[in-house]
Each structure stands twice: as C-alpha cells, then as structure tokens.
Image (cartoon, helix red, strand yellow):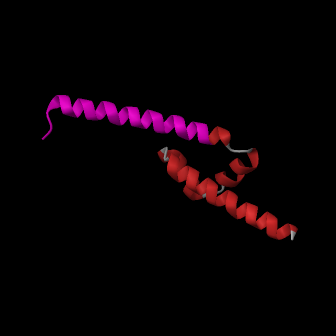
Amino acid sequence: MLAPSANMYHAKQDQARKDEEGKLCTFLKYSFSEEAKMTLRSTPAYLVADIDNDSFAMYTIARDSHAFATRFAVAQRA
C-alpha cells in the first residue's frame, strides 16, 4: 500500500492531468467548423469521447470523419 503522501501526490497529479485533458478537449471543440460539429454530434463514438474528455479519441474520430467527407466530396465532384 502506498504511503498517504504518495496517495495524495498521485491524486494531485491525476487531477492536474484531467484538468489539462479537459482544456485540450475544449480547444478541439472550439476549433471545429460548424459543419464538423454537426457531423460529429451525430457520431455516437464522438459523444462518448466528449463525455469522457478523451482528446485523442475526439481528434481521431474528427480526423477520420473529415477524411471520409473530403473523399466523398472529391468523388462527388468527379
């Protein structure tokens, strides 16, 4: 079992990590265009990542969604 000071240190570091993760998620959400936000709101995996404050999952889902939409738009124009 960890010493009380080690537990407190870990809890403090974990809270700091969660705070930074939340800031990054907020930055990501504000950086999306309105069209991207509309598309992402209809994606269940994105909604779960948003609730969990999982910035990597949010970024990955947004990137994949944008790549799909871009390829579709290019194919549609051709």
- Part of the protein shown in magenta: 1-28
Name the residue located 84 percent from the left edge and 69 percent from the top edge. 76
> Where does residue 65 sit, x and y in percent of width and height?
66, 59
Nearer to us in this view, 37 or 69: 69
Name the residue located 49 percent from the left edge and 44 percent from the top edge. 53
Vertical order, 9 against 59 (above or below) = above
Relative to 71, is 27 on the left or the right?
Answer: left
Vertical order, 3 against 38 (above or below) = above
Relative to 74, is 40 on the left or the right?
Answer: left
Name the residue located 65 percent from the left edge and 53 percent from the top edge. 40
Q: Is residue 47 magenta?
A: no
For the C terminus, the image quarter is bottom right
Q: Is residue 7 magenta?
A: yes
> Where does residue 12 sit, x and y in percent of width and height?
31, 30
Q: Main secondary structure of the magenta part?
A: helix
Relative to 73, is 19 on the left or the right?
Answer: left
Vertical order, 75 against 23 (above or below) = below
Relative to 43, is 56 on the left or the right?
Answer: left
Q: How many marks?
A: 0
Question: Where is residue 19, by image quadrant?
Answer: top left
For the N terminus, the image quarter is top left
Name the residue located 69 percent from the left edge and 57 percent from the top edge. 66
Question: Where is residue 70, by image quadrant?
Answer: bottom right
> Where does residue 5 sit, x and y in percent of width and height?
18, 28
Q: Residue furthest right?
A: 77
